[in-house]
Image (spheres, rainbow, N blue to C red):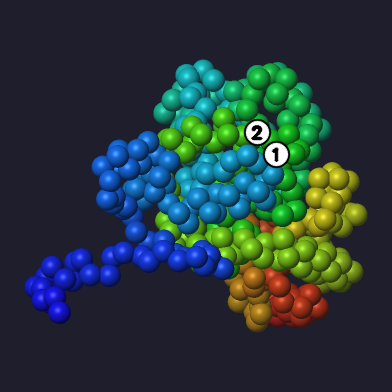
Amino acid sequence: MSSPGKPETVAIHAGTRIQNSRTVDLVPPLHLSAVGWFDSSDDLDASLDGRDFVYGRIRGQNAVLLEEAVAALEGAAAAAVFGSGMAALRALWDAQGFQSGDRVVMPADGYGATRALYKLLAARSGVELHALTLGAEDAPERIRTLRPRMVLAESITNPLLSVPNLPRLALAAHDVGAAFAVDGTFSSPALQRTLAQGADYALQSSTKWINGHSDATGGTVAGSAERIEPLLAARVLEGAILGPFEAWLTLRGLRTLPVRMRVHSANALAVARLLAEDSRVTRVLYPGLPSHPDHQVAASLLPSGSGGMLAFEIAGGGRDEVFRFLERVKLARPAPTLGDVATLVMHPATAAARRMTPEERAAAGITENLVRVSVGLEDAEDIARDLLQAVDAARGRR
Ligand SMILES: *Cc1c(COP(=O)(O)O)cnc(C)c1O
């Protein structure tokens, strides 16, 4: 029997070698080791070119598996995963190598934090930022006139659920040599492959539908190998990689994304129809309803469903009614996110559009009595019933 050794030494070195086996794990293991070591100096030397798993900031087993899955879902050659959607948007900006005087076009009706981040980055580097309503008829013409270096669009906008015509915008961007990036968070790659609709970069906040269970923050960018390689190289230096556990959870969520999106879409359409025929509610916005201004575009770009987001107004209501509504829902949850298995409700005027002035909100069509809903996987009639009883309760106390 070999001597047991000193506890300090044994505690460090026992149980550190994984036995090789011929089985393949049905579920990828959570690979937490942030560092790899080598028996052979040649192997160590070769690993430091970035192709191996030698250091967690350079490459991670769970991150790479998620990248393979995201690339496959987006119909892309490659993908890079980041610690958040914002980190992905930051990496996208950095990869363009903008110079002072360059122009960037982004949505006027897009995600507020993206607007704030790009404003900051533009101010630092002398880039001219132009916020346009990309769903407007004249958007492609304005892009051709502005001649930007990059155009960023969102697949479905927040909170009015407008669906810009991506192929038309892509043509305009490419005509003037601009890179075309699409934040597809609201539609998800299960419903809309934005690369096939002209995007050069397909971005996602995987925090939302891809993960789908609100237990991991993350961001993804997919595209050609030439577009993604620089993002991966910069990520090594900037340290924005997605951690193993977040990657593991996100991949687990992604497995059911297409199936979930089918139900989220069907539920949202059913709830939108029930709300639209109710007099306690006005202006039901859902791209899958024929009454939505972008219904035709949505039918062509999102043929298998318009997603899980909808918005409506409480008839005759204002901010007070919406605040009471948020307290009276029983099944839905007032939460400042989207894409969960549960139905989530929020008040855009005081949440996503909080930093706009009342005049800007009015001009954009974001009214005080507007409610945004991320429709969950509960029974559609249960969801509609819950929303309407809360509308009743909110209006009754006036
Ligand atoms: C949430 C969101 C983001 C930011 O993603 P995080 O994961 O929260 O950093 C970007 N774009 C859109 C459209 C979003 O909804």
Seen from the viewer's position, the closer of residues 299 and 276 is: 299
* Residue at the image position 64 percent from the left and 73 percent from the top: 342
Query: Badge 2: how crowded within 10 Å, few (<14), some, or many (20+)?
Result: many
Q: Is residue 383 left or right of residue 352?
A: right
Q: Secondary structure at mark 1?
A: helix
Q: Is residue 317 above or below residue 107?
A: below
Measured as percent of width and height from the top left, residue 311 is found at 74, 60
* Residue at the image position 55 percent from the left and 54 percent from the top: 66
Q: Secondary structure at mark 2?
A: loop
CA separation, marks 2 and 1? 6 Å
Q: Quadrant of residue 373?
A: bottom right
Measured as percent of width and height from the top left, residue 281 is found at 81, 68
Q: Is residue 90 above or below residue 273?
A: above
Measured as percent of width and height from the top left, residue 8 is found at 11, 70
Q: Is residue 280 left or right of residue 228?
A: right
Seen from the viewer's position, the closer of residues 319 and 377 is: 377
Q: Quadrant of residue 211?
A: bottom right
Q: Is residue 5 left or right of residue 93?
A: left
* Residue at the image position 28 percent from the left and 65 percent from the top: 16
The tag on residue 195 is 1
Q: Which residue is mark 2?
A: 200
